[in-house]
Amino acid sequence: GNGAPQGPAPPLGLRVPCGPWDPGARARALGSGLCSRSHPPAPARPQAPRPLSLSSRCGAERRPRSARLRSWPARGAEPRWVRAGLRGGAAPAPAGASSGASSGGFTPCLSFSPAGLRRWLCSAAPAPRVCVVGSGPAGFYTAQHILKHHGGALVDIYEKLPVPFGLVRFGVAPDHPEVKNVTNTFTQTARSGRCGFYGNVTVGRDVTVPELQQAYHAVVLSYGAEDNRVLGIPGENLPGVYSARAFVGWYNGLPENQDLKPDLSCETALILGHGNVALDIARILLSPLQLLRKTDITDSSLAALACSKVKRVWLVGRRGPLQVAFTIKELREMINLPGARAVLDPADFTGLESAVKDASRPRKRLTELMIKTALEKPVEMQAGAAGAAAPREWGLKFQRSPQEVLPSADGSRARGVRMALTRLEGSGDSAKAIPTGDVEELECGLVLSSIGYRSLPLDPAVPFDSQRGVIPNSSGRVEGVPGLYCSGWVKRGPTGVIITTMNDSFDTAQSLLEDLQGGVLDISPSREGFGLVESILHSRGVRPVSFSDWEKIDAAEVARGKAAGKPREKIVDPAEMLRIIGH
Amino acid sequence: MPCWAGLQQDPSTIPLSILPSCFPSLLPPSTPREAVLLWFFPFLPPILPGCMYKCLIKLSLHQRTAQGTGSRMAHGILGLLRPLQSRLSASRTRLVLLCAETEQHQGPARGWAERAFSSTHQDAPGESSSEDRVTVHFINRDGERLTTTAKEGESLLEVVVNHNLAIDGFGACEGTLACSTCHLIFDKDTFQKLDAISDEELDMLDLAYGLTDTSRLGCQVCVKKWMDGVTLRVPMDVSDMRRQLEVGKQSKQ
């Protein structure tokens, strides 16, 4: 303990007081240091596992002999004082706040003792080791909850990319920086001594789930949804048709979508879907450039949007206004977007005022806002404000189901979409759209299908429900596989905002803690944790990225963004990320 | 360094001697140093005079104070010693408690945990001006009642965070109206006297679990003098409701 904490002002919301923790404390405790020899850049990962040799360890963090051979405590574990850090919530009750459970007499529970002392005194069992696969909000909230409510557990988070935070970094729109404040609490969790972060490790390829189950007492799968649902209509693969997931990944700097190069040279864009992702894309397409320039949107997408000719965006959905999936905050933002005009057909909203009279408050307010916008006369825009050009437009179209994407004359790109008009059967969320037989054609050059994300199976050892696209589970416990848990979108399906994922992750963490307490999760066999995984990764030529490495990448991104007046300039090439940290 | 990291590094200055004598069976030594600590120090209390205890504690606390953890250590020692008053002589205990208490207010507050604690120590009754402190009660999801005093003008989110109250997942977006995790339920009278709610707050509240007619977001409500003694409830979340349902189902079977 020799460092004051670096970094920004205290993050609110995190209940794990990690104190003045030096991010490198854990590494230093193990006595590791970087190899001082210089090396050529790391070769591409070989397909066959390579034998472990001295050369393969060069450049790796080497642990001194004494740390490796130490038998007391268990090999590969950090010293106790690093592990048994402070517990949030179980911190000594400050004088100002009294919890109901204060005990004045002599009790073994030691409610006023320093937390680490309590752990030192009360446990002779080995520390439970938990592995979390995925470093998005689901992974971090699960880890946070486990660390907070179990004074001795050690949690390791694995991530396939070199950079953490998942959809908070790659899914949240660039003009919503407040939502990204959750990364502050994730950073504190990752910096705590009992949490390890290992990026650049693809579970399922670099290390399998059975191997993780050998190394850890419990494995939590929080790898989210990396694929999207397909429309299943002819013409879907024409140039000009993209999935919303790929488009969002493109402007948010997700490495695999950087080659998207969407064609923005048409005037009309069609977005299929009535969710928040659809509204996000519409807003990014129509936002004035000077607003986007100050966000962390990637430079290349900013350049593409500067040349964009898109003036009109239609959001098309199969069902009616009472079934829209977007939320009122995003709709309000769209209505108030400078330089853009909302075009809603009042005919779509006749009779709805009375229909929502008894609906829940969120649905009622959302529908009322849509009705109000539809009935409002369009405000005459001043010549100076919007410039000489007509304002951009966006609108909602209801009860239209896409049947075919129509190709242009030479068949080289999309030129429009044929849609079947539908009628609704039933009401509320369970209403079904039935085609009436009538069709309508809408001309457009850009089609974005925003009909939902989808999870993919990770490993043959993990059961997967392909129909629903989730891992079968009950309260986060994977069915049929003891010691395996899941949280986040891969558990519940790809819907919801951060609070949904937070509650869901706490639910899984609670199940895991209950299993630990009840003995269902057996922690008597001592597991090596990352010690075992490290040797597996070495043998496969994989070099994990630590959290302090990510902080170097983070600092580089922030420094590059400063010059342009952006919060950060995201690095989109994983090879460049690895070069920055010297891998 | 955690405050008690020093335990391993400087065993001779830690007044842990009391503990081994109480329940040695709970102390599995994991290093040779710990084994020495365990077996040697039970013999210390009768041997050392009271003044040496004072010096030991002052020494250890000054060390910790340099890292800003003195106040935490002081509380820890207070807590340890209180139940054991009968074992030590009264005078010795008084000395120890005196030292521990005087150490509370020393030490620079560094790191946000220390900052949290030092602000709490300012709240300790009798030690600061109580005219502008407002007492607020929170009932968290486990039914625990958490009481704290807040400064007028602080938002309820700041109160929860600064006083490190045991409420899971509170204030994810740090007060920027981008989530609904600081959702609190007020009683009817208090709710009606609050400032008008904005559209933006209503929009985010729409997404909250367990929404009631007297719900507000904690980051938008500031503590006022007339709120002295108010009780706020943290609503249950979906997983809590799901668990309740499961428990109900099991009890019916």
Image (tube, rainbow, N blue to C red):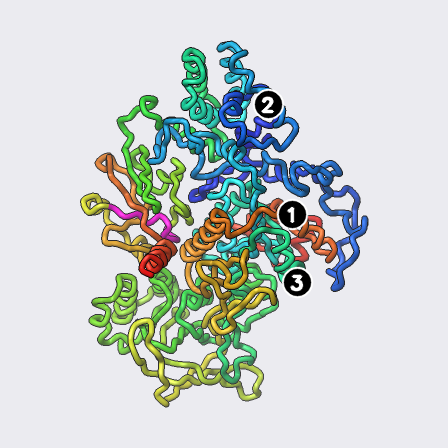
**Quadrant holding the C terminus of chain B:** bottom left
Residue A289 spot, x, y in % from top left: 47, 61
> Is residue B183 a member of the stretch shown in magenta?
yes
Identified at 28% across, 37% down, the residue is B136
Label 2 sits on residue: B39
Amino acid type of the residue tagged 1 in the rendering: Glu
Circle 2: residue type: Trp
- Residue A556 in sight: no
Instruction: Sort mark 3 into few (<14), some (14-19) or many (20+) by Cα contacts within 10 Å.
Output: few
| Residue marked by disc 3 | A205
Residue A193 higher or lower than A292, as above or below: above
Mark 3 touches mark 2? (CB < 8 Å): no
Q: Secondary structure at mark 3?
A: loop
Classify B197 as above or below A69.
Answer: below
User: What secondary structure is the magenta-colored segment mainly?
Assistant: loop
Please tell me whether mark 2 sits on a helix, a strand or a loop: helix
* Left or right: A316, with A541 as reference point: left
Nearer to us: label 1 or label 3:
1
Q: Amino acid at mark 3?
A: Arg
| Residue A183 rendering spot, x and y as whole percentages | 50, 49
Q: Where are the magenta residues, as a range?
A: B177-186
Residue at screen point 33% across, 37% down = B146
Farthest residue to the right: give it.
Answer: A54
- In the displayed structure, A223 sits above or below A185; it is below
Q: Nearer the viewer, residue B220 or A511?
A: A511
A210 and A491: which is toward the camera: A210
As drawn, is A199 to the left or to the right of B196?
A: right
The answer to which of A367 and B69 lies nearer the viewer is B69
Taking A466 as reference, is A166 above or below it? Answer: above
Q: Which residue in the protein does label 1 denote?
A: A528
**Magenta-drawn stretch contains A327:** no
